[in-house]
Amino acid sequence: MEILENLDALLKTFWFVAIPTSLIFIIQTIMTFVGVDSTDGIEADFDGDLSDVDAPFQLFSLRNLINFLLGFSWTGISFYTTISNKPALIILSLVIGILFVYLFFVIIRQVQKLAEDNSFKIANTLDKTAEVYLTIPENKKGKGKIMISVNGAFHELEAMTENDKIQSGSVVKIVKIENNNLLIVEKI
């Protein structure tokens, strides 16, 4: 650490923040890729109820603190010789640190979009329109089939009607679901 002893106080501060922060970041990254990282930070020491907030991650977490300190310290080190005005350098470092946290937020939001559940659920067909594929007999006397698009995928499902017979090619609306697998439809 003799190298750091001869530096200006501000530059020395940037280095003392950058070194441990970078080590923690490297450890976090390795743990994430290995699968050891199961949470997004540490428990908060305050009683704020953030359960109603619809955010993909907690703003005050160890990971976000590390991201901020990484941006802050390495910006200060990188621009120390270029920017001679110390308050401007500190302000720039703060802005870049905040941008690092924001960038992490954007990346996490994009990754969470990949985790959407697009599996087929018959409940998602209620009140949707479909096309009759096989004629549906009148008054629940038999089953026909409909073709319906749910979440961008077409499904062929059994259907009945409580009214008149519905011919193939007709457009129908799903009004009820019986026994979790049979759709009750009516002609539009």
Image (cartoon, grey):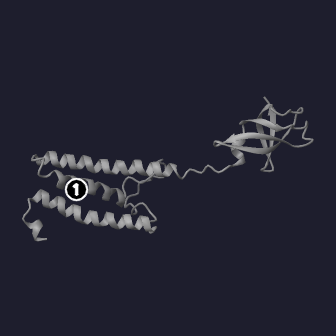
Residue furthest to the bottom: 1
The reply, left or right, for residue 7 in relation to residue 43 is left
The reply, left or right, for residue 183 in relation to residue 84 is right
Task: Give me the residue at 33% from left, 65% from top.
Answer: 26
Q: Quadrant of residue 135?
A: top right
Judge by depth and name the residue closer to the eye, 81 or 62.
Answer: 81
Question: Residue 69, position in %: x, y?
Answer: 27, 57
Q: Secondary structure at mark 1?
A: helix
Task: Give me the residue at 76% from left, 40% from top.
Answer: 147
Question: Residue 102, position in %: x, y?
Answer: 35, 48
Q: Quadrant of residue 23?
A: bottom left
Question: Residue 44, position in %: x, y?
Answer: 38, 60
Residue furthest to the left: 6
Type of amino acid under label 1: Trp
19 to 152, vertically: above or below: below
- Please name the residue that numbered disc 1 is placed on: 74
